Amino acid sequence: DDLDCDTVPDGTDNCPAVANPGQIDFDTDGIGDACDTDGCTDDLDCDTVPDATDNCPATANFDQADSDTDGIGDLCDTGGCLDDLDCDTVLDAADAFPDDPAASVDSDQDGFPDDWNPGKSEADTTTGLILDVFPTDPDETSDTDGDGWGDNGDCCPFNKPIHIVGGGDHWLSLQWVYDNALGSFGTMQVQAFYTYGPLVLDQDKEITIQGGFDCGFTNNSGAPTIIESLLIDSLSGPVTVENLVIQ
């Protein structure tokens, strides 16, 4: 019952005519290595992974590593993304987010991407990236109230006061804000604007100009007329008011 005298009965011996006491069958094809004349017949590269499921069937790839997850193992992936871990076409050395295919550029190096890669969106990020609302300012990232001022430098980061930034047309916006303020209170956050015509605040409303910036108010044409009150709130920072005529 044991033709090859290897202590394994012929009925269960994977090499009944050749001694194979350890019953080693490297390619797990049912034929012991000692008599398997075709070698690793179902495992061409003899890496213990059957050819049918081996991502490198002709190259031993024991751990089946496949960095770019393209189904071809790293050891035989000649056209893969071995220098581009996230396969976003931007090489790792130049990729600000080498392990996330959704983004690659971070101009201010604050850890938040400038924009999504072509064809990508927030839904494609694999590391929870959030776009930088201020991609060239390393001190600002988000703008919760959508007012154009970063949360870190915004005295009202969760509210949306009107910001007057400068230029010949903005005094009209200041007048409009005052005229359309709800109730008896209006809030404006101002940075260096100039009046190019009379600014008349003659309604029964109270205006607060909030600072945190150096604000220069210059009377270039006509004298702004303020009836009622103008409140200067400097709790959030110094405010400089120059050449403002009140009458």
Image (cartoon, rainbow, N blue to C red):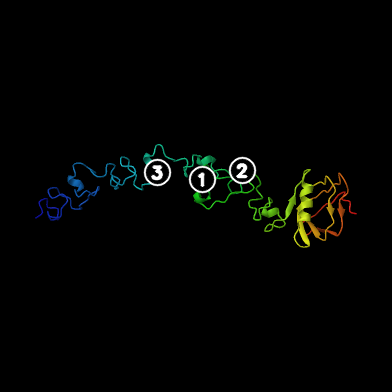
Q: Is residue 162 left or right of residue 245?
A: left
Residue matched to label 2: 107
| Drawn side of residue 80 relative to residue 27, left or right | right
Asked if labels 3 and 1 touch by Cβ distance under 8 angstroms, the answer is: no
Left or right: residue 113 versus residue 168 is: left
Horizontal and vertical percent position of residue 165:
75, 47
Foreground pick, 160 / 199: 199
Q: Which residue is mark 3?
A: 70
* Relative vertical location of residue 81 with respect to residue 10 in this rendering, above or below: above
Q: Amino acid at mark 2?
A: Ser
Q: State the residue in front, 27 or 55.
A: 55
Q: Mark 2 and mark 3: span between their CA atoms?
A: 30 Å
Label 2 secondary element: loop
**Quadrant in which the N terminus appears:** bottom left
Q: Earlier in the sequence, mark 2 or mark 3?
A: 3
Q: Residue 55 location in percent, x, y?
A: 34, 44
